[in-house]
Amino acid sequence: MRIRTDEDYAYRKDVIEGIADFYDANKTKSLISAADDVPRLVDAAQEIIERDDLTHKQRQEIIETISTRHISFEVDVIDGDLKAKARFE
């Protein structure tokens, strides 16, 4: 598999090299690790956001802290239960 890093996609090279630095591994292993880790981290974040012992302010602070350029979270009340949902951009 090849990932384009030319012209409009040049930023991808920096992202890929950054994730390799983060994981202290080669680019392939780092991308696979990130692809494996992100869904698990999002699931864990949603569980934390849905905790019923948090105040509204605490929940908002957590959402602001863990949201990224590409992932944000929102909370809905469904049948009296809090449901956190990740939104991907």
Image: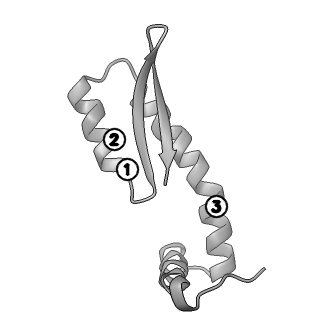
Secondary-structure class at tag 3: helix
Q: Give the residue at x 49% y 8%.
A: 79
Sooner in the amino-acid sequence: mark 3 or mark 2: 3
Q: Residue furthest top?
A: 79
Measuring from the top left, give residue 83's x and y in whole percent.
48, 24
Label 3 crowd bin: few (<14), some (14–19), many (20+), radius 10 Å:
few
Disc 1 marks which residue? 67
Three-letter code for the amino acid on which mark 3 is drawn:
Ala
Q: Give the residue at x 54% y 73%.
A: 23
Measuring from the top left, give residue 46's x and y in whole percent.
48, 35
Q: Residue furthest left?
A: 57
Rendered image quadrant of residue 51: top left
Label 2 crowd bin: few (<14), some (14–19), many (20+), radius 10 Å:
many
Q: Is residue 58 above or below residue 6?
A: above
Disc 3 marks which residue? 35
Query: Distance between the Cα atoms at labels 1 and 2?
Result: 6 Å
Label 1 crowd bin: few (<14), some (14–19), many (20+), radius 10 Å:
some
Q: Answer left or right for 83 relative to 53.
A: right
Q: Give the residue at x 51% y 39%.
A: 44
Three-letter code for the amino acid on which mark 1 is drawn:
Ser
Q: Give the residue at x 30% y 23%.
A: 54
Q: Is residue 25 above or below residue 7?
A: above
Secondary-structure class at tag 1: loop
Q: Are marks 1 and 2 in contact (CB under 8 Å)?
A: yes
Inspect this view and state whether residue 76 appears: yes
Measuring from the top left, give residue 17's x and y in whole percent.
52, 84
Measuring from the top left, give residue 34's x and y in whole percent.
59, 63
Query: Distance between the Cα atoms at labels 3 and 2?
Result: 21 Å
Disc 2 marks which residue? 63
